[in-house]
Amino acid sequence: MSNEKASILLAVRGTAQESLREMRARVFSIVSTAITLFTVFIGWIVQRSAKPSLPETILFICIIMMFGIGNLLILIDIRRGYIKTMGISVRVEKALGLYEAKVFDEEDESIFPSSYLRPIKGKHFQKFELILSCSAIASILIVILRYVY
């Protein structure tokens, strides 16, 4: 492989890795902000002296659902982008020979283990999606309980 091709691949890999880091940070930021807002909203509802009426309860539930579903759709979209970008990164790493033994040194093992080649499913993101969904469901249950009691 020529030096020019190798430098292009290294630049692509660097860009892909930076993009992956940004996606992970964005997911954490979205989920932590959503949980904080759910907590503040529920705290406000619970501390209100008056019990919410039925229309208020329905409105609160709709707000929680729209906010939760909206954020969940954003997370799913980020996960799709992450999986595609990770595929690009793995392809570049293969082209650079990082999964082949004795390319850069005389070791019998490659620099990157072959386990890195397994398909990426974005389990990291799925956990955050689950956390967000559980937070929204818990918030809805608290609103319902506040209406009932």
Image (tube, helix red, strand yellow):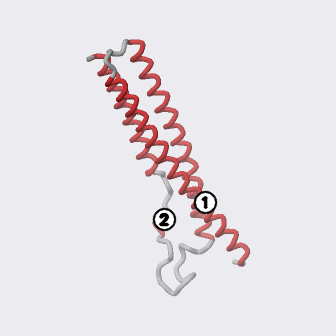
Residue 102 falls in image quadrant: bottom right
Q: Is residue 41 left or right of residue 82?
A: left
Nearer to me, 124 or 61? 61
Mark 1 nearby-residue class (10 Å; few <14, some 14–19, many ≥20): many
Q: How many marks?
A: 2
Amino acid at pointer 2: Tyr
**At x 71% / y 72%, what residue is drawn?**
5
Split into 4 quadrants, where in the image is the C terminus?
Answer: top left
Amino acid at pointer 1: Ala
**At x 52% / y 33%, what residue is drawn?**
70
Residue 51's mark? none
Marks 1 and 2: which is nearer the front?
A: 1
Q: Secondary structure at mark 2?
A: helix
Q: Position of residue 146 (x, y in %)?
A: 30, 20
Residue 16's mark? 1
Q: Position of residue 132 (x, y in %)?
A: 42, 39
Split into 4 quadrants, where in the image is the N terminus?
Answer: bottom right
Mark 2 nearby-residue class (10 Å; few <14, some 14–19, many ≥20): few
Q: Is residue 103 above or below residue 9?
A: below
**At x 50% / y 37%, what residue is drawn?**
71
Q: Is residue 87 above or below residue 142?
A: below
Q: Position of residue 21 (x, y in %)?
A: 53, 57
Q: Position of residue 104 (x, y in %)?
A: 56, 82
Q: Are marks 1 and 2 in contact (CB under 8 Å)?
A: no
- Which of the marked residues, 1 or 2, is nearer the chain's N terminus? 1
Q: Is residue 131 left or right of residue 90?
A: left
Nearer to me, 26 or 121? 26
Query: Which residue is denoted by mark 2 in the rendering?
Result: 116
The residue furthest left is 149
The residue furthest bottom is 106
